[in-house]
Image (cartoon, grey):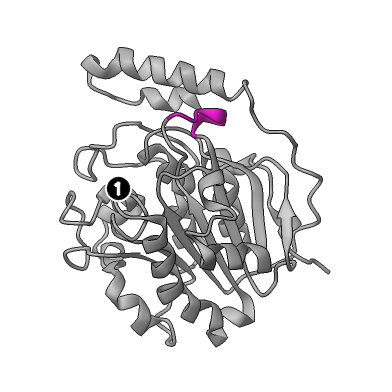
Amino acid sequence: MYASCLRILPAARFRWLALVCCVSALAGCIGGPVAKTPPPPAQSVRFGHVFIVVEENHNYADVVASPSMPYLNSLANQYGLAANYFANAHPSIPNYFELTTGQTLTIIDASTPHSFPVSEDNVIRELIAAGKTWKSYAEDLPSIGYTGGDSGNYAVRHNPIAYMTDVQNDPAQTKNLVPFSQFAADLPTANLPDYSFIVPNLCNDAHNCSLTTADNWLKTNLDPVIRSAVFQKDGLLIIVFDEADTLDFTAGGGHVAAVIVSPLAKRGYKSIAFYQHQSVLRLTLEGLGVTKLPGDAATAPAMWEFFTTP
């Protein structure tokens, strides 16, 4: 995994990069995961629609059972909580790439879609190949198809799909980069894609604002999703934090919360199995019937223990 950190970076940053990668690798061996993944059941669950929401920069202990996030904790208690889930690296951007390409690729948060186009295999390439539809719904995105840099509270590093050459080089795919304001209109219609990557802005993802602000945003915007007929049929929602605070290098990026919500999920289920972001990538693609898995997702522990299978 850490070899991917070395992809074409400015020479002046190389020594710093090497140090971070070494510290991350060591951290994974010190005070790391306490349980291994149990043998998963045979995968037979299929989702009609998958939604991923990524929150920012808080440790597991700051989130789980916290009075600052009553709504997220209500979901964790009602559905599934991955209690031994760890981010892959610091800072943010490698975790977003792990969620979408199965590789960390870079640790330079200043990378933009134009300075760092991603041609590696990725979630969009495999969704398209499997005939699945997708959209990225990004709050405060300046316009449909925008692949530029940061704008106001929109942080492009939190929208990894904008970096994919499969998207940038195809106008038909670029138009699937849409402002989050379109999400509510799409939800009850045939315009809702099979795969939705949802990007709150820098305040509402808890990067710049409080966990309470983020929790209120989740309740306002995701509760209607969970209650919708389309979700209650066969939906999957994953809410996960990209990384812990920068003092926690355990397993690379620290201990974070990941909540699994689905009508097909076991109720009140808490897993102590070790997972990282590549397992979410595997779950979302396999759950949509995609068989080719990018990067680390191909060998990642499967998360089917969260679901009741025939």
Q: How many marks?
A: 1
| Residue depicted at x 78% and y 66% | 308
Classify 10 Å Cα crowding around label 1: few (below 14), some (14-19), many (20 and above): many
Q: Decide whether residue 30 is among the magenta residues.
A: no
| Residue depicted at x 45% and y 49% | 100
Residue 288 seen:
no
Which residue type carries mark 1? Tyr
Residue 7, compared with residue 220, is above or below; it is above
**Of the pair 257 and 281, the residue shown nearer to us:** 257
Q: Is residue 22 left or right of residue 151?
A: right
Give the image location of residue 207, x and y in percent.
Answer: 33, 49
Residues in magenta, as a range: 247-253
Give the image location of residue 98, x and y in percent.
Answer: 47, 42
Query: Which residue carries the number 1 mark?
Result: 163
Q: Is residue 275 left or right of residue 214?
A: right
Which image quarter: residue 26?
A: top right
**Of the pair 92 and 146, the residue shown nearer to us:** 92
| Residue depicted at x 32% and y 53% | 159
Which image quarter: residue 54?
A: bottom left
Residue 163 seen:
yes
Q: Is residue 107 left or right of residue 282?
A: left
Q: Decide whether residue 248 is among the magenta residues.
A: yes
Residue 21, compared with residue 273, is above or below; it is above
